[in-house]
Image (cartoon, rainbow, N blue to C red):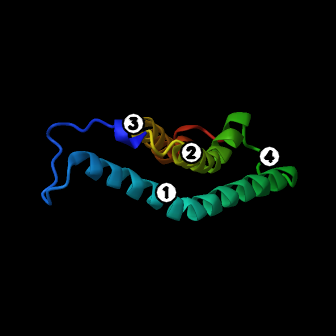
Amino acid sequence: RLVNIEPNPNENDAKGKEPCSVMRSYIVWRRSSMMLSLPIFLYSTIAGFVEINQFRIDKEEGIYKYYTKMGEFAVILPSLAEAVFFISVICSLVKWHQWQITSRVLNTGWLVSILIPFVPALIPLS
């Protein structure tokens, strides 16, 4: 599948490699980087779900009794954003050879995981 990648005519390597091999090297490097960072993303996702569970326990004890339903959702949302990024990395690892699709998936996952934590600051919690 990587053989079918057509490089841009402007993509040249200073070392004299053909552009296809440079693109393949980049894709393989990106895949290995995602595989190395996967345990960190997994830990972050598990920690997010633990935080959601702790929020549920605190809510039963009455700590968040003045929060509206939208406020409760806004508190949980940043933890879910970590899970979205983890899922986008997993999807990109499964389809790692389709670099255009995986680039969009990773960029979307990154954007969601960066912007969603700002939502609680914009929504009234109580």
Point out the image quarter for the N terminus.
Answer: top left
Marks 3 and 4: which is nearer the front? 3
Residue at label 4? Answer: 65
Give the Cα distance between marks 4 and 1.
40 Å
The front one of 19 and 39 is: 19
Q: For the residue marked with disc 2, what is the amino acid?
A: Val
Residue 96 left/right relative to 56: left
Residue at label 3? Answer: 100
Mark found first going from the N terminus, 3 or 2: 2
Give the structural element (helix, strand or loop) at label 2.
Answer: helix
Q: Are marks 3 and 2 in contact (CB under 8 Å)?
A: no
Residue at label 2? Answer: 94
The front one of 4 and 9 is: 4
Residue 27 left/right relative to 6: right
Q: For the residue marked with disc 4, what is the amino acid?
A: Lys
Q: Are marks 1 and 3 in contact (CB under 8 Å)?
A: no
Give the structural element (helix, strand or loop) at label 1.
Answer: helix
The front one of 90 and 29 is: 29
Residue at label 1? Answer: 34
Give the Cα distance between marks 3 and 2.
13 Å
Give the Cα distance between marks 1 and 3.
16 Å
Q: For the residue marked with disc 1, what is the amino acid?
A: Met
- Percent coordinates x, y for residue 113 in the rendering: 51, 46
Q: Residue at x 73, y 35 (%)?
A: 69
Q: Residue at x 54, y 41 (%)?
A: 119
- Percent coordinates x, y for residue 89 in the rendering: 54, 49
Q: Badge 3: how crowded within 10 Å, few (<14), some, or many (20+)?
A: few
Residue 126 in sight in this render: no
Give the Cα distance between marks 3 and 4.
46 Å
Give the structural element (helix, strand or loop) at label 4.
Answer: loop
Marks 4 and 1: which is nearer the front? 1
Mark found first going from the N terminus, 3 or 4: 4
